[in-house]
Image (cartoon, rainbow, N blue to C red):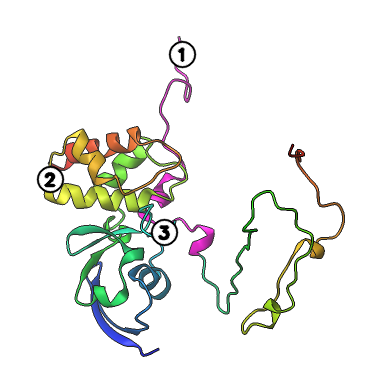
Amino acid sequence: MKKIKIAIVVNSKKYVIETYPNRTLLNLLREDLDLTGAKEGCGEGECGACAIIMNGKAVNSCLILIGQADGATVETIESLDKNGKLHELQEAFIEAGAVQCGYCTPGMIMSAKALLDINKKPDDNQIRTAISGNLCRCTGYTKIVEAIKIASERMH
Amino acid sequence: MSEYRTIGKSKKRVDALGRVTGDTKYVADIFIDNMKYGVVLRSIHHHAKIINIDISEAVKLKGVIDIITSNDIPGKKKYGVIRKHK
């Protein structure tokens, strides 16, 4: 297989990477850039554990072939806390008890961030729609929705 | 009445921080040089009785290091509640 060359901005850092075109953006983040916050749950776009923000939108990075990410700007969970200070969403998730095993948490927070970036005061329905692609098997969704609400109130 | 330190109060999970920052390392997040990968192969038939597993062709495949079946486990292998299906 022939390698392809792509340029990508991940968490404000520019990369030019030569790699095989059958790899996914999730593979690149986790294996090449050592950003293991995004998880592979199902690997087929069902669970949202791999959700990241690409060009302002929450996407399942396991469904993005690396060629599709050429020229993209990507944000992952690792970009949220700044100098030891947590993002409002991260704070709220801890406070509201929205974290248990934590496997869905990075994806859940990135989906929530993509929502709050475009909608400062979402209602319950909008929050539920925004995280409808993220499965959580431990906490139930009530505390997660609550956490996103707390964060939206603190941010704006 | 004196206040309790924990009872009746919400406590932050001690392990929540790494989980909201993505720092927590799950097993799948650990990469080691020259790491090997394993997969589980399950029967494609429900309630089937495994009489024999022939791995002879599979072990010949390129990159296969080993195939482990119940034959590789010594001693008693039936643990837990095993109910007979009617």
Instruction: Tell me how far mark 3 sits from mark 1, CA to CA.
Output: 45 Å
Q: Position of residue A80 (x, y in %)?
A: 27, 56
Tell me what residue is drawn at x 70 percent, y 75 percent.
B66
| Tag in front: 1 or 2 | 2
Q: Is residue B20 magenta?
A: yes
Q: Secondary structure at mark 1?
A: loop
Q: Amino acid at mark 3?
A: Lys
Q: Which residue is mark 2?
A: A119
- The magenta segment is B1-29
Mark 3, mark 1: which one is toward the viewer? 3
Quote the CA–CA distance across marks 2 and 3: 26 Å
Q: Tell if the residue under mark 3 belongs to the same chain as the one under mark 1.
A: no
Magenta part, dominant SS: loop
Identify the residue at image location x=36%, y=64%.
A62
Q: Residues within 10 Å of mark 3 (few under 14, many from 20)?
A: many
Q: For numbered disc 2, what is the local secondary structure?
A: loop
- Residue behind mark 3: A39
Q: Earlier in the sequence, mark 2 or mark 3?
A: 3
Examine the structure image and report whether residue B68 is included in the region drawn in magenta. no
Callout 3–callout 1 Cβ contact below 8 Å: no
